[in-house]
Every structure is written in structure tokens, then in C-alpha cells.
Amino acid sequence: MQNRFVKNIIFLLFLNLLVKPFWILGIDREVQNMLGDALYGQYLSIFNFSYLFYILLDLGITNFNSRNIACDNKMLSKHFAGLSEMKLLLGLLYAVVIFVVGYLSGFREGFQLKMLFWCGLNQILLSFVLFLRSNMQGLLLFKADSFLSVFDRVLSILLMGFILWSGWFPLDRFNVVWFLQVQTLAYICTIAMALYLVLKHVDHLHFNINFRFIKEILKQSLPFALLVLLMSVYSRIEPFLLERMLDDGGVQAGIYSRSYRLFDAGNNISNLFAIMLLPMFANAISQKTDLRDLTKTSFNTMVALTGIVMVMCIFYRQEIMTLMYHPESNETDAAYLLRMEQYARVFPILMGSFFCLSTTYVFGTLLTANGSLKQLNIVAASGVAVNILLNLLVIPRFQSVGAACTSLSVQFLTAFAQYIISEKIFKLKLGAGYWFHLLLFLGSIVLCTWLTKMLHLSWYYAFAIGFVINVGLIFLTKLLSLKEIVALVLPVEKR
């Protein structure tokens, strides 16, 4: 099973590394540069507000469906029509809730409500995309799912790139609604493609709203729903709290969002592990096969990739922020440098949070596949309580830096708790030697990055040299075996 994991994760990473970083670091970054921190901060606040209620669109159906089909492929034909009907009804419920709660929360201006409409519509469409993809994941058709995972972003990049750089559109009148409408069109096209792929594997369809079926599915999937809701709150609530608690027109939320951008790019890649691992863990558990090797392979891969990203971003925080964001029109050099320092203070803290969050995509997914939702929900509820309490204390005084520290603290505590629970349930017994091995690797990349930065070279060259050596350390420290990976990826005749 771990062989299949390595093959598919390499293919999935290849596609997503080609597409999603360009979207976040190219398109999304350019949009924020055009809108400015204040307006973009308002948009991010509304976007994250709409995301907080995303669980109403899903109620755990996606994870439940993927896990169910992985255990028994016949469940695709049996449940597809009924679950699709549920998704439509949940979309209506979600639309009502976000507008009512949004109005009560203070989103009452015409432009704010317009942004809320498009953000909400995109969340509804995205939930359909993820539901359709869960069917492919449950069938372990990872290549088809990999193409679907980037299809919407490829379309969005092409459309937004044309708007931003073709010269055919008046950019002086550019607003965030254009940005949202492009994503709407991309999601609709992706749904059409996903439907075509899924229906090829469905034996029969019978649409007839069955409230008894809906009740039974909700009963089984609500624990998944609660988990997603709680994790969404403690992972994404900071920009909303910054915009609501501080009377600065969204400036601190905008600063947080710029520093958060690489976190988001990395998290999109790390989340792919969870998407792929859930059906694989579920299948392995149902077959009662040994989980230790698959767990170690996936965790080692996660630590290797995210560890290098975290360490290099911490050491080169100022340079990366300066590379990503340029002076605004009529901005003095002193004001620009001050703005970069603000970003650089928040950025390394969030990258530490990113590393902790990424580890939950292994042990948290293992527990989800096992159905250990009570334990996960207790951990997530604790994370929400700690997050809100800390943010209420630190945001008024420390603003975006305080919010970032809260994120790091909560992600570390929840990741550690999930590992402890996993070790107890599955008796993994990784041992002190295994953890020393991981610490040796992390210590080695810290030392290597520090030494290469001390070289009297342009930071571009020092960064590139450090990155190459750090990748080599993955194999020198034997965290992963190059020989095994080559043997797994290449066909027998080419080895």
C-alpha cells in the first residue's frame, strides 16, 4: 500500500506544484497588489466568513462518501443520486444562513453583500466539486482525481491572466467581483468534467428525494461534519477576528493575508496527502493490513517537504516578502520598508503553524479513516476554545502578530494530541530512535540553511544552493530512500 501512496503522491504533487503556487503567488498576489491591503482584507474577511459555514454544504458527506466507497465500491451506485439531492438541499440552507448571519455580523453595505453572494456561490460550487472528486478517491482512481484537483485553477489562471495582462480590460476599474466571477465560471466547468468522469462508473441513477435516506446519512456523517466545522474555525478565523475586532478598515487582516499567502499555497499541497490517504487508510483498515509502514512513509514525506519549506522561509523571510510585494504607487521607501517588516514578523510564525498543520494530515486522517471521530472532535473543540480565548486576549494588543502566534500554538497542540491518540489506538510504537531521526533531519536543514545564508552570495544563489543541499539531506539522513522511490516510480523494464 505504501508503494501505491508514493507513486500517486508524486504524480499529484507534480500537477499541483505546476498550477496552484502560480495561482496563489501570481494571480492572487497580483489581485491584492491592485486592490490594496484594506480592500483585500475586507474581501478575505468575507471569504473566510463564508468558509466558516462551509460545513453546512457538506455535513461530513465528502469524507463519509470517500471512506464508504473505498470499503465497498458498490456504494457509489447505491448512494450517488441520494447524496447529490442532499447537496442541493444543503446549498439552499447554506445560502440562507450566510446571508442572515452575515447581515447580523455587520455585512450590510451593498458591495459587502455582493462579495458575500459570490463568495457563497463559489463555496457551493466548490462543495459539489469536492463531492464528485470524493467518488473518484473512493474508487482509488487517483490520476483522474489529480487532474480534477487542478482543472478549476488552470481555467481560473487562464481567464484571470487574460484579464490582468491582455490589455483588453480597464484595470483602473478592476474590482474583486471580477476575481470571484472568474472562479465561478471555472467551478462550473469543473463540475461538468467531474460529472462526466463519475457517471462512467455509476450503474444506475434514480432521483427521488428520500427523507429516510437523508436522515440515515446525516446520522452517520454528522460527526465528520462537526470535525470539519471545528477545524475550519480554529484554522481560518483569524482574518475575520482581525477585521471585526480592530477599527482599521481591514489593514491588519490584509497584512495577515499577505503573510498567509505562502501558508495557503503550502497547505493546498499538504492537503492533497489527506485526500489521498483517507481512502488508502480506510481500505487498509478494512483489510486489516499493517498500517505502520504506510504511516511512516507518509509522515516522513510530509516532514521532509514541509520541514524544508518552513526552515527556508524562516531564514529568508525578509527577502521573500520583498520579492513578493513591491512598493505601491506614491509609497515612500520608509513606508515600504516598514510594511515589509510587518509582513516579515508575521510570515515565519505562520510557516511554523503550516508545519504543525501539515502533520495533522497524516495522523488526523488516520483517525478519520478509523472512525475515531469522538476523539478528533474533542481535540478540535479544545482547539477552537483555545484559539478564540487567545485571540481575544492578544489581537487588541499584538494585532496580526498575536493572531499568528495563536495559530501556531493551536496547530501545535492539536497536532500533538492527534499523534498521541493515534499511537494509543493503533499501537504504532515508532520509538525514540525514530523521533531522533526526524530531529536529526530538521537540525541538519537548519544548520545547512544558516551556513549557506552566511555565504557572500546573492540571496537567490544562497537560497538555491541551500534548497538543493536540503533536498539531498532527505536521502543522506535516510529519511526517505532514493533507491526505493526510483524503484517504485519507474516500470520494471527501466530500473
Image (cartoon, rainbow, N blue to C red):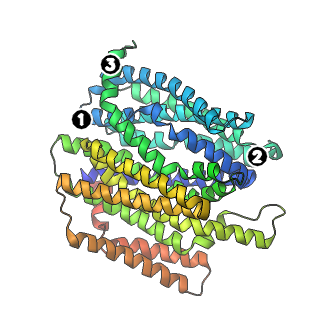
Locate residue 154: give its quadrant: top right
Q: Quadrant of the C terminus?
A: bottom left
493 is higher (above) or lower (below) than 106: below
The residue at the point 38 percent across, 32 percent down is 61
Marks 1 and 2, Cα distance to the nearest angstrom?
49 Å
Camera-nearest residue between 21 and 46: 46
97 is higher (above) or lower (below) than 36: above
User: What residue is pinned by disc 3?
Assistant: 213
The residue at the point 57 percent across, 58 percent down is 260
User: What residue is pinned by disc 1?
Assistant: 71
Return the disc, 2 or 3, that comes first in the chain's sequence: 2
Binning the other alpha carbons within 10 Å of mark 1 as few (below 14), some (14 to 19) or many (20 upward) gives many
Q: Is residue 205 left or right of residue 335?
A: left
Q: What is the three-letter code of the residue carrying label 3?
A: Phe
Marks 2 and 3, Cα distance to the nearest angstrom?
50 Å
434 is higher (above) or lower (below) than 210: below
Binning the other alpha carbons within 10 Å of mark 3 as few (below 14), some (14 to 19) or many (20 upward) gives some
Q: Nearer the viewer, mark 2 or mark 3?
A: 3
Percent across and percent down for residue 78 are: 30, 21
Q: What is the three-letter code of the residue carrying label 1?
A: Cys
Return the disc, 1 or 2, that comes first in the chain's sequence: 1
Q: Is residue 293 left or right of residue 124?
A: left
User: What residue is pinned by disc 2?
Assistant: 166
